[in-house]
Structures are given as C-alpha cells and as structure tokens.
Amino acid sequence: MGRDNRGGRGHRLGFGLGASQETRARARVAGPLYPGSGRTPLRPAGRRSVAVVDNRTEVREFLTTRRAKLTPDKAGVPLYGQRRRVPGLRREEVAQLAGLSTDYYTRLEKGNLRGASESVLEAIARALQLDDAERAHLFNLARAARDGAREPRRRPRSEQVRPSIQHLLDSMTTSVAVVTNGRLDVVALNPLGRAVFPLLLDAPARPANMARFCFLDPRSRQFYPDWEAIADTTVALLRTEAGRDPYNRALTDLIGELATRSDAFRTRWAAHDVRLHLTGAKRFQHPVVGDLDLVFNTMALPADPGLTLAVYTAEPGSPTEEKLALLASWAATDFPAQQDAPAEKA
C-alpha cells in the first residue's frame, strides 16, 4: 500500500506538518472523541444477506468447505488415475477416513449433527484435518444443533469492565491495552490505546466496533497496511463467535449489517473460516506518528464472561517503541484516562 498521504486525513493529522499544525494534530490524538468522520455512510446494498442462516445450513456449508480444502494428496487418499471434477475430497472418502458409513456421513454433512456423539465429531475432525479453531467450531455447531430452536440458559455476558479492570488497563503506560467483546465492540481501553486507535474511536456508531471500522470505514485501508489479512481475521473471529454464541442477537444484527453493506465481508463470510486469535504481530499506519509494528497477546477475562483483553507491545529499542513513548506522553499530559462508552447489551 502506498505511503503518500498528501491531501488525506493522515496528512492533516501530522505527516510533515508545521509546528502549529503539529500542535493541532497532538490535540486531535489526545483530545476528546469527535462525533464522526463527516463521510456519507455507505448505502445498504439491495440484496439478501447471507448472514442469517439456520444451524443445518451452517453445518452443511462448514463441512463442505472444509472437505473442499483438503486435497486427496494431503489426506493420503490414493487416486488410481481417477479423473476428478473437484480438487477436494469426496464425501465417501471423508467417511472412509473417519470410519463412518457413507450414508451416515452424508446425513451429517447435510446438516444433521443433532445426534452425533463426541467420538463421531472427533473422527470427522481428524479426517478433515481440522485445526483447533475449526474443531471447536464443529463442536459448537453440534451443541447448537442439540439445543434446537430453544435458546439454552447461559451465564450472562459482561458488556462493560469492572473498575478494577479499568485500573489495570490504566496502569499499563507503555503498552496498548484494549478490551473487546465477542462481536469486537471496544468495551474499554487505556490512554495509550485511545492514542493509537483514534480513527476507530471517532466513528459515529456506538459502541466503537473493530469489524464495522474495518469493512465500512474507508480509512481502515490506510490504517491497516495489511488490510486483506486483517479483514480475513476479523471475519474469522466473528464466524467463531457466531458458532460459540449462536443466540446473540446483537452479533447477528452486526453480521447482517456487514453482509448487506460490504461485498468484501460477504465474500469472506461465505468461506466459513474460523480462527483463534491468541498472539501475533500487526502493522498500523498511525495518522500522526506513522508506521507502528506491534506484537499482541490476548487473554480471556474469566470473571467477565465474553470479554477479551489484548495487549500490544513494541520491540525494545525499536522505532515503534519510541513512537509509543511519544504517544504515551501526549496521552498522559493532554487528557485523563477514561473508560469508553459501554457496549450495547447482547
């Protein structure tokens, strides 16, 4: 992605600016949140959403896409010179690998996981070579199939942090700390987090949401130099959460909105990819300090069901560490730590 920011929002916020403009840029990063970007919202596309589907459809499409991804060579299935119309495995080959009859596996793949035992699910996961995230998703789909149309009783999910968690965030002065819920609403940040994610936070919709910013805000493609990878991960996380919490109306509404308004989201959603997002590296193009290369680690907050803490750090002695120190000094001197508006109830 190009680095030329002339005339763009990033240029106005501090790339190659004079002293007075730099002062205004600092105030922009450290000051109170603006109500919006001033851009006209994207008009909803006039087509049917692919997001709201029943459990049988979810099961069928998930297993079909996993089977299509696994080639006979990777699965160790002999070809014997056969001509194949598709690169992936056939149903009978998956059934053989799982030790199941073809008829039984066919019924399962058509969406009927309701009576599948744990051993059968494990056999299918091994046959399809599912990773940890995919295996967990398969088991979540089976649990939802057993629950049927009745929403199970579940422990209420937290939608805002306790004061002690906010104090913990605020104590992290050299790291970026962000708490999100399963649908990627920003529930709380520390001051440095607010300084690093100003574009995300000034979006007009509340609560601020990472998926909505990624797919509906054109500034995200500048902010994320690796936008395609970020978009893939974002959709995979939402798909994972949908399998884990299929009765979450707020999540369903968000998926429907994104599928209606974004072709990029809709295409990725149809792939049925899921992911665990525990650690890794991300690049950001900050509107004031430029490139930031950060490593992140995430952890669930067991006392706050549904909330996840992500902490971003810079390599010691790196240019990014110096830039974070600059942003931290602005955040510490120009505005007090404050908690973001609570997320909407799920």
Image (tube, rainbow, N blue to C red):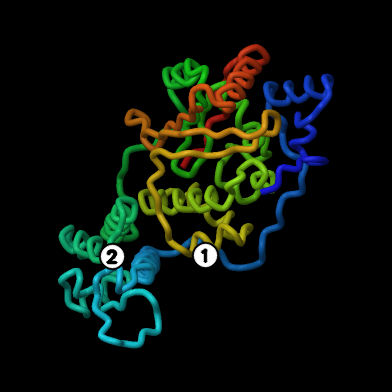
The answer to whether residue 39 is visible is: yes
Label 1: which secondary element: loop
The answer to whether residue 247 is visible is: no
Mark 1, other Cα within 10 Å: few <14 / some 14–19 / many ≥20: some
Mark 2 residue type:
Leu
For residue 50, the mark is 1
Can you say whether 89 is above or below 295 in the image? Answer: below
Residue located farthest toward the front when viewing the structure as drawn: 317
Residue located farthest toward the top when viewing the structure as drawn: 333
Q: Position of residue 289 (x, y in %)?
A: 67, 28
Can you say whether 237 is above or below 123 in the image? Answer: above
Numbered label tally: 2
Q: Position of residue 280 (x, y in %)?
A: 44, 39
Of 97 and 18, nearer the camera is 18
Mark 2, other Cα within 10 Å: few <14 / some 14–19 / many ≥20: many
Can you say whether 261 is above or below 156 in the image? Answer: below
Which of marks 1 and 2 precedes in the sequence?
1
Residue 108 placement: quadrant: bottom left
Left or right of 133: which side holds 203?
right
Mark 1 residue type:
Val
Label 2: which secondary element: loop
Residue 147 placement: quadrant: bottom left
For residue 60, the mark is none
Left or right of 29: which side holds 190?
left
Which residue does the image show at 31% across and 87% down from the upper left? 82
Which residue does the image show at 62% across and 58% down from the upper left? 262
- Proximity of marks 2 and 1: CB atoms separated by less than 8 Å: no
What residue is shown with label 2?
128
Which residue does the image show at 50% across and 42% down from the upper left? 184
Left or right of 197: which side holds 279?
left
Q: Nearer the viewer, mark 2 or mark 1?
A: 2
Measure the alpha-carbon separation of dots 2 and 1: 25 Å
